[in-house]
Amino acid sequence: MILRRDLFRLAAATTLSSLTPNLARAEQHAGRGMVSPRIKDIQVIECEPAGVRLTVVKILTDQDGLYGYGCATFTQRADLVRPAVEKYLKPFLLGKATDRIEDIWQSCYDSSYWKNGPVLNNAISGVDQALWDIKGRQAGMPVYQLLGGKCREAVDTYGHAGGEDYADVVSSARHYVEQGFRNVRVQIGVPGMAGYGSSAAGSSNFKPLHDKPLFEPAQYIRRALKMFEVCRQELGDELNLLHDVHERISPNQAVLFCKEVEKFNLFFVEDPLSPEDIDYFRQIRDNCATPLAMGELFNSPHEWQPLLEGRLIDYIRCHLSQVGGLSPARKIAILAEQFGVKTAWHGPGDVSPVGHMAQITLDIVSPNFGIQEYSPFNDRTQAIFHGCPLMKDGYLWVNEAPGWGIEVDEKEAAKSPFTPSKNGLNGGWGEIRRLDGTVIKQ
């Protein structure tokens, strides 16, 4: 005769036996027994497909065929990023689990003791973006799905219009309108001076006390204000106009300039001040309602946090690799959202297609997306980077393939190596001076 207590013991033993394999599997899926891919090697791919030096980090794992790419492009000091990755980050990271993206970012950030330098940030960015690419490839999803999915179908952009004279600027802007763009940045040259975003505009009677490129802020301001007047007359009020001051005027002039352009209803004025003068944004805010964009030169949270918390700008436009990659940029976007600031990430030609896709990914998932700067990819770039972001009717479209959806043809990249720069500065910017020889910020 089987006692009731024996039946209970038998049932309990049978249940435990049947659950043991399931519990083991659950523990594995919870991470207690699962083997994560490990970093096996870190490589640096350098190329110059469009006259601009691009740097991409490739992380290989111990799982066959699993790897990822990240943008580490710092054109102005391109030769310094490779040793930062190969001599410092690589020995530090070999053997680490690829699924601990945030932990890896934080430990790399602390590893050099001194933080927020552009070389270190770009090197970390290459690692960070490559790890996100690996995560997406593992999951079989584009990275945007890992960040919560789409907030919009595609990314609205602006193109770069410029010219030596007003008619040239208008013609250049119309070229973008004909392609379906709704937003255009307009820049104009100043006779006898080095312009930004446009060709030099003929000669002048200025006689500088030096032989370097010349720039006088007052002349630029007068010519830019006239350009906005002509653009509004010729292009109408429906086209969104943007403009980049590029930090080349004094803080007081920036306040006056932003007050004067208020009547032209610009989409935004970019970089009216240099990072050293960000306290003056409060003066601009107190004097006009011109929308302001700032951030492409930022490297440190100490630069963007006060502007966001003070609601002193309307658009944050950091360069993703300069701030350290996708992980910190995502945090910037989230912080900006809390203060009503929109994103407008820096998207010039000296960002690799991998970096552009990382930007577009953030654009797609961020509720506070504002606009995206657009730079086209030439045939040579597309031969190296398969899966460049698609442009159609002024919109950029995110890839639906796993990870970034980009593959780098390393053999093609080797055909476009870094070349000596024309100015002999190895990719660095030259100097621009006022009439008396004073250096102009840029």
Image (cartoon, rainbow, N blue to C red):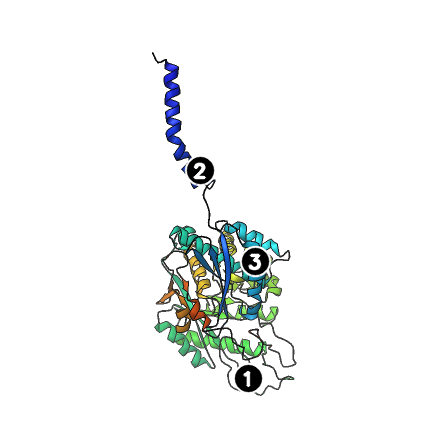
Of 34 and 387, nearer the camera is: 34
Label 2 CA crowd tier, 10 Å (few <14, some 14–19, many 20+): few
Rendering coords of residue 254 (x, y %): 57, 69
Q: Earlier in the sequence, mark 1 or mark 3?
A: 3
Rendering coords of residue 144 (x, y %): 41, 54
From the image, tell me which residue sits under label 1.
192
- Give the SS element for disc 1: loop
Q: Quadrant of the N terminus?
A: top left
Rendering coords of residue 164 (x, y %): 47, 81
Q: Earlier in the sequence, mark 1 or mark 2?
A: 2
What type is the residue that disc 1 sits on? Gly
- Give the SS element for disc 2: helix
Q: CA distance from mark 1 to mark 2?
A: 71 Å
- Residue visible at 62% across and 65% down in the picture: 276
- Give the SS element for disc 3: helix
Query: Along the horizontal axis of the image, is 292 left or right of 388?
Result: right
Q: Quadrant of residue 29?
A: top left
Query: Does residue 63 appear in the picture of this structure?
Result: yes
Q: CA distance from mark 1 to mark 3?
A: 46 Å
Q: Residue 27's mark?
A: 2
Q: Residue 370's mark?
A: none
What type is the residue that disc 2 sits on? Glu
Query: Does residue 239 appear in the picture of this structure?
Result: no
Label 1–label 3 contact, CB within 8 A? no
Q: Earlier in the sequence, mark 2 or mark 3?
A: 2
Q: Quadrant of the C terminus?
A: bottom right
Q: Residue 89's mark?
A: 3
Label 1 CA crowd tier, 10 Å (few <14, some 14–19, many 20+): some
Placement of 215 over or under 305, stated as above or below: below
Q: How many marks?
A: 3
Rendering coords of residue 126 (x, y %): 51, 60
Label 1 or label 3, whichever lies nearer to me, is 3
